[in-house]
Amino acid sequence: MTEAWEPDDDDDQRPRGASGPVRVRVPAKVNLHLGVGPLRRDGYHELNTVYHAISIHDELTARRGDTLALTMEGEGAGALALDDTNLVIRAAHALAAYAGVPAHARLHLRKQIPLAGGLAGGSADAAATLVACDALWGTGLSRDELAGIAAGLGSDVPFLIHGGTALGTGRGEAVSPVLARPTSWYWVVALADGGLSTPAAYAELDRLRAAGAAGPPLGSTDALLAALRQRDPRVLAATLGNDLQDAALAMRPSLAATLKAGEAAGALAGIVSGSGPTCVFLAADAADAERIAAELDAAGVCREARVAHGPVAGARIG
Ligand code: ATP
């Protein structure tokens, strides 16, 4: 923890922090491997996952203010509450409490990551808020300290501070970077109408498993990690997997048609992202991704198909 901020009436005399706006971009995540283990006593499932940050970004701008206020535009505007339930507000309070500073800021969120889409948009916004307010308030925490606060806000939040490609264990909050060759992978991201609830998807998986109706669990990440060390998207394609996919398909049967259309369009592989309903497809290269996205749009099997690449950095100023 750093020395506490001391109140000062004169802005220019403040010991540290930014006087102007701080703008932070934060990516969406997909899970290249989402292995769901048994339900723990604390209500979470034990996870063995490989996170991957992709180039669909939310942007959070933080300015000095006398209270804490949030405005937003873009995906989910009008539907998402901007009160204390919003992960942006929760993250600002968590950082302020940790650092012993007043939670005063005017925050504006520009959202491109869909709500409840399985791309961890809310977690991304929480990560962006921690990085932005740390700079605005001059609290000067290390990335590891920020990741520690992040873990209290949600399982995916620490990863979105770091970005890149990383292994997630525990309930997903214990993150370690994956050493991979510096390669860009090209993805087509098929956004769906409406969201799916993450807790409902886990409950559905528990139900399917109890009924013996779920597929076999994914197991180790070894094959995927080995594939990431090569540059061949075909090798990577064969190792993608998501234990929550059966649950998402049971809750949203129309996703089967989306996955089928992506494969018919030439995607090397398609999976449901996280708890869905977004589907992601691995393409051979950037041009192929553009072509597959256009075909998915024309087939009418998703709200919108976007091209993205990964891995990209986590929450960053600029
Ligand atoms: P994950 O992939 O981590 O399961 P998701 O992408 O399916 O998450 P999110 O968009 O992160 O879903 O949001 C899940 C829920 O969190 C939303 O339905 C909303 O009620 C709540 N929420 C709170 N703050 C935010 C925020 N800033 N952006 C999005 N959702 C938020």
Image: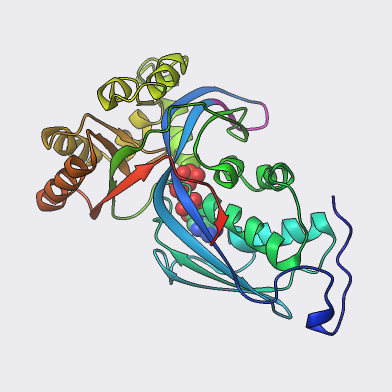
Q: Residue at x 58, y 33 (%)?
A: 172
Q: Is residue 123 visible?
A: yes
Q: Over which residues does the magenta segment extend? A: 41-47
Q: Nearer the viewer, residue 174 or 215?
A: 174
Q: Residue at x 58, y 61 (%)?
A: 86
* Direction bottom: furthest residue: 10
- Is residue 23 positioned above or below 131 on the image? below
Q: Looking at the image, how many numbered discs can be counted on the residues?
A: 0
Q: Nearer the viewer, residue 135 or 244?
A: 135
- Is residue 188 positioned above or below 130 on the image? above
What colour scheme governs how the chains and residues are painted in the rendered image of this protein? Answer: rainbow
Q: Specify whether 70 is left or right of 92.
A: left
Q: Specify whether 132 is left or right of 17.
A: left
Q: Position of residue 116 (x, y in %)?
A: 43, 51
Q: Residue at x 37, y 32 (%)?
A: 247
Q: Position of residue 19 (x, y in %)?
A: 70, 76
* Direction front: furthest residue: 182
| Residue 300 included in the magenta stretch of the image | no
